[in-house]
Amino acid sequence: MDLKRTQLLLLFFAFLCARVRKLNGDSIPRCIPIERNALLGFKEGLKDPSNRLSSWVGDDCCTWEGVACDNHTSHVVKLDLRNPHPLSYADDLPYNKWSLGGELRPSLLGLKHLNYIDLSMNFFGGIPIPEFMGSFRQLKYLNLSFAGLGGLIPHQLGNLSSLQYLDLSYNYYYYGDNFEVPPGFLIIDNAIWISRLSSLRYLNMTYVQFREGAHWLQALNMLPSIVEVRLSDCGINAIPLSLPHVNFTSLSVLDLSWNSINSTIPGWLFNISSLEYLDLSGNFIISTIPGWLFNISSLEYYLDLSGNFINSTIPGWLFNISSLEYLDLSYNFFRGIIPPAIKNLASLKALHLSDNWFLEGKIPVEFGELCKLQYLGLSYINISKNLHELDKVFTGCIKNSLETLYMENTQLGGYLPDWLGDFKKLKYLDLSGNSISDPIPESLGRLSALQKLYLFDNKLNGTFPKSLGRLVELVELYLGWNLLEGVMSEEQFANFTKLKSLDLSQNQLILNLTSDWIPPFQLRILFIGSCKLEPRFPAWLRMLKNITYLDMSSTGISDTIPDWFWRSFFQIFDLDISSNGITGSVPDLTNFINLNYFNLSSNHFEGLLPNFNSSILQLLDLSNNSFSGVIHLDIGKSMPYFEYLSLSTNSLSGEISLSLCHLRYGVLDLSKNLLSGELPNC
């Protein structure tokens, strides 16, 4: 009996396990054959240079890269083929090797249960969005941004009545090197189809071009659930000044920036009680700001009127919106003073007033009462004062909250006052492009949270203060184009372990750095032009493997460039080692595919010209050396963006290559060589 009971128990447990497996879906086929075939048919039309879809083999399509199935029905419900790799400026046509391309085949229609499609960050070469995209009635999410699509957007997309998220932004296609043909964009001729997207909550059509009479506003006004609308840079030239009725009951974000809107700000905006973010920057709005705009009691977070041509004083009633947290009035033509009523914006966290040259220089002391202010942008305002005279402005409670102070090119003079050291939360200080003089005060060393310090292009003199060496959080330090002098030793750099950018150029500094020095940082940007180094090429540079921008011009080097430099820095964008006494030859540089700026002028280089293979090279200056031989026959074929080419004052011989006719110069200088033959007709 015990054996029978044991057998029965084993059978019972086996039955239970089978039931659990069935409930978990383990016994259900994980991929429906007709849907697997639909995916394979879609894949056949794609170009996949990096083999991202290598997992699309076998029977179980639900395990394939970018494919997700419903746990209960096994239907394919999600197709996410977004390019997972970041785009690079150096990539061909604006996308990289990981981008999918080719065709969008209608075999995808076999996936009738799709609710999510993402093909963003790929490059489809300007093909239109296929009409069949409007057939996925269960689709809730469609992202085709940055996909290199073009042409008319099909009205069939209006059939996607379940769609909640639609992103068609940043689709444009440049036709190779043909600069005569304008770039291709996605185009809307009539936007009424948008009104049928009754479930839509998010719409982004940045860079989609709206033709005149597209009725975009009427279409949006019929969407009951819309929360966020972004129509930046869409070629919109007018906003209807009136609507029969306003249905925007949920609208929170409206971005119409960088269009060509030349009308007044319409009154119907006043009726959007849910609006929190309004961006009208970069337009041609010519009237004063209407008072009704500031009766929008729900506008609690973001108001952006930057980049317009508003030509008036800043109205005082603007500062009665006590709940406003973000105010951007930059890139305008406001006149007069900043009203003292600014203190009423007690909730303000960010204030942008930059690029209003006609604002008068008086900064109200009431700024100091903005106890929550974290960002203050006052650049390109004609303040015309000595910085130390602003002590009453910056000694209130603002010093306990401010994280960013941006006052570039404001005609400031005087010296750097000690009260700057009291901003304990300050992370970003930019006072560049002014006439500030005297030595850098030791008090700046108290800014323990500082990450970015921009003091370049002033008249600062004296030595590099030791207190700056205590700024252990510093990531960017720009002191170039001043009158600093003295010796900087390795000790002063010892605590800069987080530093990524260093600019000491165009000063009279002496860098006393031994050849065996190991820098404590890994820089991406190093500008030390006109600083004095020892005559030998700096061996410590070998430790800085991440440098992409390097200026060592006029540093007194009189040595050959070691082989390790050319092997280690092939990823560099900008290189300037001009005006030294460097000798030797330059090797083949065809693997320097990221070069944009390359200046070896005024040295003693000799031998043949190096070969280049950078499609983004814009400036090449090899003048005032001793290069010899002929100019390469194909020098112009692989460099379509050349703007400056100087090979003057060398010993180059032979004829001028016809390939130079392919280049689009701002400057071409081949003078003082030994060239012969005829000038090409170009």
Image (spheres, rainbow, N blue to C red):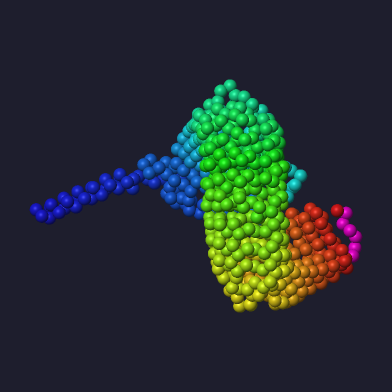
Residue 338 image offset from top left, x and y in percent: 65, 41
338 or 29, nearer to the observer: 338
Name the residue nearer the viewer: 37 or 274: 274
Task: State which region is magenta.
Answer: 676-681
* Direction from residue 577 to residue 490 in the image, left or right: left
Q: Where is residue 323 in the image (x, y as percent from the top left)?
A: 52, 38
Relative to residue 655, is residue 181 drawn left or right? Answer: left
- Residue at the top extreme, as displayed: 244
Query: Would you place residue 476 above or below residue 231 in this image?
Result: below
Q: Which residue is drawn at 81% across and 64% down?
A: 647
Residue at (56% x, 57% y) in the render:
422
Residue 400 locus on image (x, y percent): 52, 52
Q: Does the magenta stretch include residue 431?
A: no
Residue 6: image quadrant is bottom left
Relative depth, front residue between 676 and 226: 226
Eyeballing the image, is 100 above or below 438? above
643 vs 533: above or below: above
Q: Main secondary structure of the magenta part?
A: loop
Q: Position of residue 423 (x, y in %)?
A: 56, 55
539 over 42 or under it: above or below: below
